[in-house]
Amino acid sequence: MRAFDYHRAADSEQAIRVAAGYDAARYLGGGTNLVDLMREHIEQPATLIDITALSQGITETTAGGLLIGAGVTNSALAADHRVRQRYPMLARALLSGASAQIRNMATVGGNVLQRTRCVYFYDTAAHCNKREPGAGCDALEGFNRNHAILGASPACVSVHPSDMSVALVALDARVHLEGPAGKRTMAFVDFHRLPGERPDIETELAPHELITAIELPALPLAARSTYRKVRDRASYAFALVSVAAAVEVTNGIVSDVRLALGGVAHKPWRAIKAEQAMVGQPATDATLEAATEAELAEARPLRDNGFKIELARRVMVSVLTELMGERS
């Protein structure tokens, strides 16, 4: 591992001020992904700024939602009684994401910024546009069973690994950011980028900007939501396909729905087309089939992952059928 400077920031303001003094500085939360990448010589920051002193609180907002500090660990968030009762899809996503040891270290801010687990990204002998812009993408013609079927580009077909981010997209979360230009918030669904020609630029973070909190809105239908993850093995593998969903049925009609997919795209994928196809329609199998067809019509499989289209369809139908049965 390359030698680096280390600073421990007392708060976000100090962290940003220190980062602005270095060209190659990285913020360090739990380190469960960044330190791995440094060991593999993929990330080689000259300076690490420890931000574990950032807020580790989960507080009520005046609008009835929750404000989750960026330093909250995945374990603490999954165990919070308000999250378990009001946003169960989030608690379930967190618990499916990693071992207990990793959840005890990993932070909210770091979780949503973790980088892809594409094997070609980790193999420094392989061509990878995400690791080295313009280098090419060996995954396109290589072993691509775990890769994207939606929103990919000729430059990159990798997928985002975070389970928590899938739930946050479905819950209409907002991300609170702070940087040299001040504070701002944005919809979490807009935070991650599709690869386009620059897959190395993964988020809308500005230079030296950092995540300070995630805000969950008051969303009553989320109280009976769920998260289902399909993977190759039960013990903490990354998702082949995952689904975060909440649905409201009134007098047999779908009145509201939230739906997001993981394991299928470069970013957590909000299933907008499926949602639009469901709202106002009878809560029937035909509606679900039409909704999944609308969402997956633009799916483009690679050589090894055509099965993901049918898998995504089946998981969406199964999860929504279960939820509609509970709400009808």
Image (tube, rainbow, N blue to C red):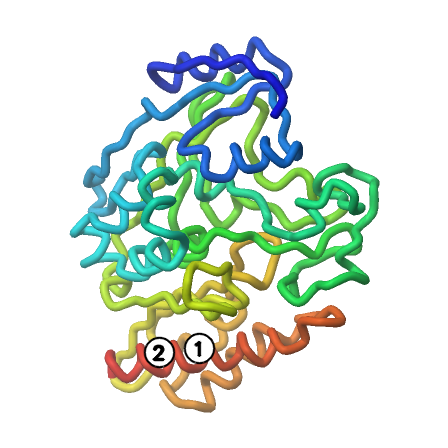
Residue 184 in the image: x percent, y percent? 44, 30
Kindly identify the residue that appears in the image at 37 percent across and 52 percent down.
99
Q: Where is mark 1, residue-wise?
A: 278
- Quadrant of the rendered image containing residue 147: bottom right
Please tell me whether mark 1 sits on a helix, a strand or a loop: helix
Count residues near mark 2 (Cα–Cα under 10 Å), then give few for <14, some for 14-19, many for 20+: many
Instruction: Say which quadrant the N terminus sits in.
Output: top right
- The correct choice, above or below, for 86 with respect to 130 in the image is below
CB under 8 Å between discs 2 and 1: yes
* Residue 153 coordinates in the image, percent (x, y): 74, 55
What is the secondary structure assignment of the residue under circle 2?
strand
Quadrant containing the C terminus is: bottom left
* Amino acid type of the residue that numbered disc 2 sits on in the rendered structure: Val
Q: Residue at x 20, y 47 (%)?
A: 64
Residue 157 position (above or below residue 204): below
Identify the residue under disc 2: 254
Quarter of image, res 220: bottom left
In the foreground, 212 or 231:
231
In this orientation, which residue lies closer to the viewer: 71 or 62?
71
- 92 lies left or right of 7: left
Q: Is residue 248 above or below residue 82?
A: below
In percent of width and height, residue 10 lies at: 34, 14
